[in-house]
Amino acid sequence: MILPIVRTALIALRRDRGALALSFILPIAFFTIFAVIFGGRRDTTPKVSVLVVDEDHSAASQRLIQGLEREGSLSVKKRPASKQGAEQSDYTAATAEAAVKDGTAPVALIIPHGFGENPISFGPPNQNRPTIQLLKDRSDMIAPQVIAGLLQKVAMTAMPDIMAEQGSKYMDKYAGGFTPEQKKKIDAGLEELRRRQKAESGGHEAAPADSNRGMPIPVTTRDVVGENKNNPMVSFYAAAIGVMFLLFTASSAGGSLLDEAESGTLDRVLSSRVTMGTLMAGKLCFCSLLAFCQLVVMFIWAWLVFKLDFIPHLPGFVIMGLCTAFAVGAFGMLLASVCRTRAQLGPLSTLVILIMSSVGGSMFPRFLMPAAMQKAGLLTINAWAIDGFTKVFWRDEPVSHLWPQVLVLLGVGFVLFAIARRLARRWEYS
């Protein structure tokens, strides 16, 4: 009796083409997306962006910056990107901090005045010694650690003569001193090392060194984004998970149109004074209202349970919530118009929504994805909604800074609804 049961189930699966396709396409699609993100290929590994401010303008600071620029895993920026061909001035400490707050880069390094006088030290900490400042965004927990480690490595590869010179000074000071002959040999060796360093500075990378040996370049770390947040990632996950489930809710609510078409209710409604455009507009308003109410409940829960700073950001939340709900509602109407039956809607909506959520950042932060995946995420509603909510709750930006996300979400909503209305004409002429 087991074989007939299996045969019956296979026949049922074959008849449901949507479920059959979903059984194979969805796993392959998800495998492909996460293989691109975590596959370990060198050309897909995202570079860490770091802003560098050189207040010292010494030979040591320049060599340190050149060493950072030679690191393949870093994208070093000393000035903002030029706009309309206009040359931009170098970053200052204030503009670099503002850029980190705006999300231009997760980390900024400030090389202070006097760094070149004593860039490397083997002795005890000196309170009067200039220290490099590392300004970071707390939402990116990986980038600051990568920068801090590479900074020590670059000190050894870019400034070997200074390292050797400082080492000899401390050896002379704490080991009882060198003889004149030993000092002469050390000076000759340092001079040879400097000549070799100049000869290799024409574009060749310095020889690799053991990064685990960590040279003591003093670094002071300071949070410039999220330093006063009780729970740094709550706002991100509230928006990310919220938008994903809003898409499911909107697709299910939009599916009521298919139920009415299958039951014959749609024909009776259209035979009255209600037009198809009016009916779909009403459905869109319902989907948007339902989606917005879900967002309100989710963020209030995050406020009450996880201490999210909700009330101070209420204006920005309302604007982003309404725009997101409108775009999501239009997406649900489009899915309903594309599908012929409710049975088709389920597999298609699951496939599209899960792919959008994985690429758009609802399942994994986009800033940790390869550059190509980050750009692909901009084709989804999730990415724009998450970026807007991040501006509101994480970066504490004013409402006026939300105009890119608002324009995109509203534009996407109107375009999707227009396409859905066009596809729904089949019900008017059926």
Image (cartoon, helix red, strand yellow):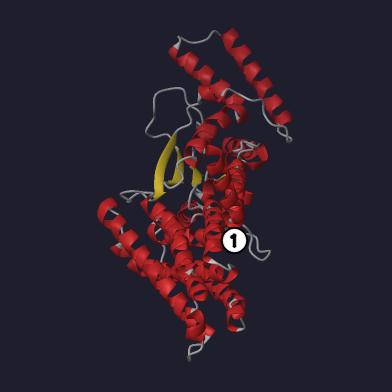
Residue 21, horizontal then vertical, whole percent: 61, 52
Up the image or down, 303 lies above or below 364; here it is below
Question: Does residue 54 appear in this view?
Answer: no
In the picture, measured across the screen, residue 282 lies left or right of residue 70, that is: left
Could you say whether the residue bearing mark 1 is in a helix, strand or loop? loop
Seen from the viewer's position, the closer of residues 409 and 88 is: 409
The amino acid type of the residue labelled 1 equals Leu
Residue 2, horizontal then vertical, whole percent: 52, 38
Residue 399, horizontal then vertical, whole percent: 42, 69
Q: Quadrant of the C terminus?
A: bottom right
Residue 8, horizontal then vertical, whole percent: 56, 47
Up the image or down, 135 lies above or below 317; here it is above
For label 1, count other residues whose C-alpha is less than 10 Å away and answer few (under 14), some (14-19) or many (20+).
some
Seen from the viewer's position, the closer of residues 73 and 190 is: 73
Q: Which residue is mark 1?
A: 379
Seen from the viewer's position, the closer of residues 367 and 66 is: 367
